[in-house]
Image (cartoon, grey):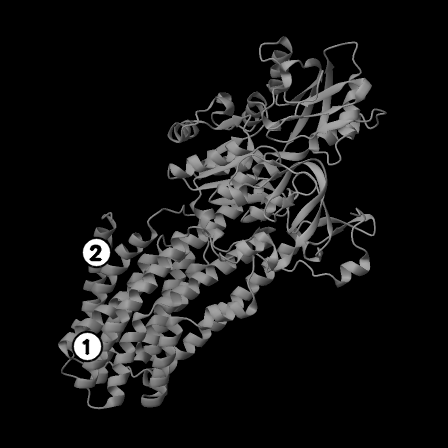
Amino acid sequence: MSLDGLTSEQAARARPNVVPRRSSRSLAAIIRANVFTLFNLVIGVLWALILIFGEWQDGAFGLIMVANVLIGVVQELRAKRTLDRLAVVVESPVTVRRDGTERRVPPHQIVLGDLVVLGPGDALLVDGEVVAADGLEVDESLLTGEADPVRKEPGDRVLSGSFAVAGTGLFRATAVGTDAYAARLAEEASRFHLAHSELRDGVARFIRYITWLVIPIGALLTYSQLNNSVDFATAITGAVAGIVTMIPEGLVLTTSIAFAVGVVRLGRRRCLVQELPAIEGLARVDVLCLDKTGTLTAGGMTLDRVLPLREDRPVDEALAALTAADSRPNATARAIADRFPTSSWRPLATVPFSSGRKWSGADFGPHGVWLLGAPDVLLDPSSPECAQAAGLASTGARVLALCRTSRLPGDEPPISRTDPHADAEPVALVALEQRVRPDAAETLAYFARQGVDVKIISGDDPRSVSAIAAGLHVPGADRAVDARTLPEDEDALGRALDDATVLGRVSPRQKQLFVAALRRRGHTVAMTGDGVNDVLALKEADLGIAMGAGSPATKAVAQVVLLDNRFAALPHVVNEGRRVLANIERVSGLFLTKTFYAIVLSLMVGVAGMMFPFTPRHSTLVNAVTIGLPALFLALAPTVERARPGFVPRVLRFAVPAGVISAFAVLLAFGLSDGGTLEESRTAAVLVLFLTTWWVLVLVARPLNRWRVTLVATMAGLFALALATPYVRHLFELNLGDPRDGLIPVGIALVAAAGISIGVKVAGTLRT
């Protein structure tokens, strides 16, 4: 089989690897999600009934529905454009061989039959068959759950969704686009969905329960109005007023807008959110696991010094030969190659470096077999050379041991379980300087102030990690833990991790186990990383955060990608999540207060067989100035309140007492105004409804600051302007009659406001 790959003409005719973007959905899907909803169907039917049987002024709620749809579509399109633009930036090109030469192409330009080049950290984006391999090991754990990398030889099948962890190879693409294994799996799950989202689940539960309540209560209310109204149009108008008010249509809109605006704001900071509800995960994080390399330290390293342990060994030549034997060198190998660039030795066999082994090696024939890797893996732990390496590591340096041995470990599987130091002769120690990011200390201090527990996890020597953490003033940095000493029992491991801050010699599999153990103990865990050894942990975490310069496999599984590789961007990411979550909780209290007072009013009116106390035009006016307009501002307001679990019960403890008390106050005002005209009675009810729900707005907006005081005062001013303007009064059928009669509704509203404050406070002390 030719290893030249396809010709350009063949590639132009072949099927390309076209798959939907994970971070975005189509325009049609956005329109469907915003237009074709159950609430829009109900409101649309009610709007049609009003336009047919009622007065056009009572159909203003239909225009608000249209505006909601348009705003929702526009905001999601803005988010889509941001996501698509950033997704192109973060997309890692793939190396393919065509016309006998290697070239880099975007993932969507891979075609069926292409010869794809693989190296450590490369994600497999299409299915294929291996045609050449040099120590190629592929991690298939995301597909099979099997932890150990799989050695691949020519003729073996490889699947998209896996990634290379060691060695190099070539495979021919046999399935692309939606035919590839990973793409078929993706069709089983929503691209716009986290495994668990308390916010989305909570809103969905509210909508589900309210839908079941609206049907029987709406039927009761309609029957009552038809029996007690003088004409059919009045009955329909009263029934529509109750049913429309029960529907929290703005809650879904506001939630979508908050998420979409969050995506756009993060996009301006060069943060790609690959799953929209990941913003919620940002707010709930209470444990942040940091991979040291590439997160706290910059990606590159410099060779500090080489300490020969044997005078009669060609140290420089061996280091140059080992780095030259690696066709895809990592940062460590590149730093050594910068000092020792050329070698005349040629390898007969190689074992590539992997994070699981923590060493690499090569057989150079007459020059011997050489190994380079972690001293505590290659050397006898009781040897003086190992002690010397430990002393160097305690300064914060990354230390490697260069050894000569009689055989090349790894000839017999499994490679990761060989004992390389059985007859290894220590020849030299290599110390590399790691550059700490200048913004790392300030960023870590931010998380400490916010109560986020930071765990620094690394495959390096614990002493080296401890020294770097101590320089960044990390609490507990002097108590670094060697991960190889940790218990395997899940509960015992979780307890040990709660007490540990700095962990070294962590294997890729252990990183995943650590994240899982912390999650089992009730923590919301975020994991940052940039290397292929972080992929499993990123996938396991509630929120995976990858660096833009990281490996393709890392960026493929992360929910958030920091395109500028700036660790200092994380506080902004977390703050944006907290803003979205806290503000959605605020506006949920507003919308559900409306829902509950409408439910109570409809029940009482239906059972008592009386006229509904207001019309749709009245509810449109009150809802606009106490819920709709302020909710848009509150949903986008700045806040850094830390997220707390229990979103649904907390909102209900606020909305139920506020809604019930508001409903009783409205009915009382409506009943006490029975001596006047129906228009005057309804005006009294509307006045009480405004004052009580305006007070709910004041409570929701707390803690009050200058702009929030301005917001609630402006809403009160708008309602007062409506009462003072003759045309608006006529449009909304508002008639106070004798001004002294207005004192009764005001008095009722004041008592109700006090009752709401007490009821909300008492309900807030309850725990479900």
Question: Observer-nearest residue: 162 or 628?
Answer: 162
Task: Please provide percent x and percent y for residue 768.
Answer: 24, 48
Find numbered disc 1 in the image and state the secondary structure of the residue it sits on: helix
Q: Is mark 2 in CB contact (under 8 Å) with mark 1?
A: no
Residue at (61% x, 51% y) in the render: 270
In this rendering, is residue 686 above or below 76?
Answer: below
Q: Which residue is mark 1?
A: 740
In this rendering, is residue 651 above or below 529?
Answer: below
Mark 2 to mark 1: distance in Å?
29 Å
Question: Observer-nearest residue: 639 or 337?
Answer: 337
Task: Please provide percent x and percent y for residue 621.
Answer: 34, 75
The amino acid marked with disc number 2 is Gly
Q: Callout 1 environment at 10 Å: few (<14), some (14 to 19), or many (20+)? A: few
Task: Please provide percent x and percent y for residue 188.
Answer: 49, 57
Sequence-first disc among 2 and 1: 1
| Mark 2 or 1: the one toward you | 2
Residue 726 visible in the current orientation: no
Image quadrant in which you'd find residue 625: bottom left
Q: Which residue is mark 2?
A: 759
The amino acid marked with disc number 1 is Arg
Asked whether, in this view, residue 752 is left or right of residue 116, the answer is left
